[in-house]
Amino acid sequence: MELIYFISGILTVGTVYGVLLLRKVKSSHASLLESSQHSSNIYSVRYKDMQDKLNDMTEHMNSIKGLMEKDSYENLTKTRKKIGTIENDIIGIQKTLNNDINTTEKSFNKAFNEIQSIRSKFNKLIDDPNFLNRY
């Protein structure tokens, strides 16, 4: 009989302890669900705000694209190609000009040397006493 009381006591204590644990788990489960619902609400509000901002940005980009098409931005690549061609032409002209400058400087130096040579020969003729006697 005592054994039956002992076993029923253990079962009663186990049942009461199990019920208390289940209440505690149910309470924590409810608080977790409430916290999850709160986070989900905040997430959905922020997602909606970001979606609105994204839509506004898309509209803004489309309006900019429309304005650029009105301004013929398609010709921008043609203009860039023309600028590249002009740049290449200018580089070629610059090289030619540098070559011409070098050639001109060489010619001036050569002419200056020839003038100096003629001047020295002329001075030698003037200083030559036999020159006047010959004529």
Image: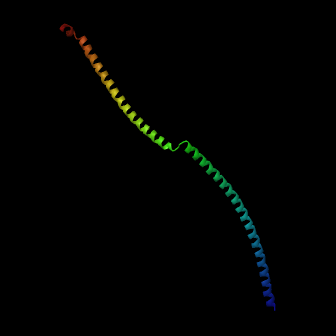
State whether residue 62 is above or below residue 11: above
In the displayed structure, would residue 73 be above or below residue 45?
above
Residue at left offset 50%, top offset 42%: 75
Toward which corner of the image does residue 122 lie, by quadrant?
Answer: top left
61 with respect to 100 (left or right) = right
Residue with the most extreme bottom position: 1
- The x and y percentages for residue 110 are 30, 24
Residue sitting nearer the eye, 46 or 72? 72
Residue drawn at x 37%, y 33% is 96
How is the model colour-coded?
rainbow
Task: Please state if 29 lies on the left or on the right of 55 as rendered.
Answer: right
Is 54 situated left or right of 74 in this image?
right
Residue 37: percent from left, percent from top? 72, 64
In terms of image quadrants, where is residue 39?
bottom right
* Residue at 78% across, 84% down: 11
For the image shown, how many numbered marks are present on the structure?
0
Quadrant of residue 2 in the image? Answer: bottom right
Residue at (68% x, 57% y) in the render: 48
Q: Quadrant of the C terminus?
A: top left
Residue 9 is situated, as x and y percent measured from the top left of the image, at 80, 85
- Outermost residue on the front side: it is 70
Q: Residue 36: where, in percent of width, then height?
A: 71, 65
Tell me the quadrant of the picture where the N terminus can be found. Answer: bottom right
